[in-house]
Image: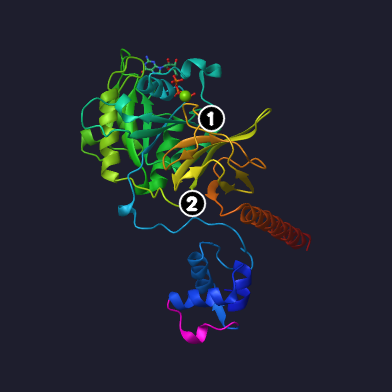
Amino acid sequence: PSSITVSQLADKFGVKLIHLIRKMNQVGMPENHRRADYLLNSDEAGNLAIEFDLNPIIDEDKGFDIFPEPEGDLSECPLRPPVVTIMGHVDHGKTTLLDSLRHTSVAAGEAGGITQHIAAFSVPLSSLMKGSDVPKGATITFLDTPGHAAFTGMRARGAMVTDLIVLVVAADDGVMPQTKEVINLVHAAGDSVGLVVAINKCDKPMIDIERVKSNLGTEGILLEEDGGEIPSVRVSGLTGMGLDDLMETLSTLAEVRDLRARKQGKAEGYVLESHVDKGKGTITTVLVTRGTLKSGSIIVAGNTWAKVRQMTDSSGRSIRVATPGMPVTLTGWKDVPTAGDQMLEAPNEDRAKKCVANRLRDDERRAMAVDVQEVNARREEDR
Ligand code: GTP
Ligand code: MG
């Protein structure tokens, strides 16, 4: 653990020594610590950083990196839309199911009929569910993921950011390799993610649901209707059968989870997709998880940063602010962030630049460390 003197820390924070000492007094640090040459340990320095809204863990190696803010008291935060990810084996009907729910026809336009990217949609609850108790303005955020074997990374990212997973299993095909892959992701996520099994294509004749359920049981997925814990619904994305049931189940599960996030303060989120457009430059889809993202905000993700330029919601409307649970596309990146990167708001451009420089330098160091390891390993072999 590194240590740093009070005056060095003031330099590092870019504040006057007297301000730092005053802050140390305010947070109740003992008087004999409040001198320029007192050596603070990294915990003390880190706590003071938070007091100054800086957030770096002060360690010579970390410098000006930017970290998520500590989670405050969630019970005082407003409710946020649940994030629901549709997952399952290729062609089991995920996109069709979402099309049917949203009254769209995405599946029909897909090249080769397969999904190749994560798609994110914010859907008004009132368009998904009937009934007077549907809260006004409430939305659900749906993520559609590809089922093709090649897109393991996208499925893992989809599972990482979600509250609920709808595992779509086609009744005429049963549990297949990517069904199992999703089940493994669910097991790995533990209690942080809820699961609903949607047995799909139930409009088809000659289907054997008992066989599907027994396959699921083998994978450790025991349905509520058989005395287990996993809720399930029988649906058809083609005819719309059972979709009311699915929505009821999802909204009940979301309600139990009491999903909340702070709207105030710096924005945080995840990069779901990232690509380079010839005209517009780098475009990303970002899911905001906390705080409010505004056009003009300075954000970092991975080894790059952006001053948020054009921001659009999932219906393609241009927007200026995005709140927790909203998927948005945005431009303004200096370089291409990687899908899966965490997105964090920086206090200003200078900090964003320093943070990125830091991360790049860390990456270089790691690469050098690997090189050294390799050289050493080779020397061992040569002996
Ligand atoms: P990937 O995203 O590539 O993994 O596929 P997907 O799971 O999104 O499947 P998609 O919705 O593209 O549907 C695959 C095929 O199954 C299409 O031909 C659909 O018309 C058909 N299909 C989807 N749902 C149903 C259903 O409920 N019943 C029947 N009979 N066919 C369905
Ligand atoms: Mg699809």
Residue at figure coordinates x 32%, y 33% from the top left? 137
Q: Position of residue 97 (x, y in %)?
A: 38, 22
Residue type highlighted by circle 1: His
Mark 2 → mark 1, Cα distance in angstroms: 28 Å
Name the quadrant where ligand 1 sits: top left
Q: Please give the name of the residue rendered at 60% of the width and 42% of the height, measured from the top-left corner.
A: 338
Q: Could you tell me which residue is drawn at 73 percent across and 61 percent down?
A: 372
Q: Nearer the viewer, residue 180 or 262?
A: 262
Q: Amino acid at mark 2?
A: Lys
Coordinates of residue 304 in the picture (x, y in percent): 64, 47
Image label count: 2
Give the label, 2 or 1, closer to the camera.
2
**Which circle's residue, 2 or 1, is located before the other in the chain?**
1
User: What residue did someone put label 2 on?
Assistant: 266
Q: Is residue 128 visible?
A: no
Q: Quadrant of the N terminus?
A: bottom right
Q: What segment carries the magenta color?
A: 28-36
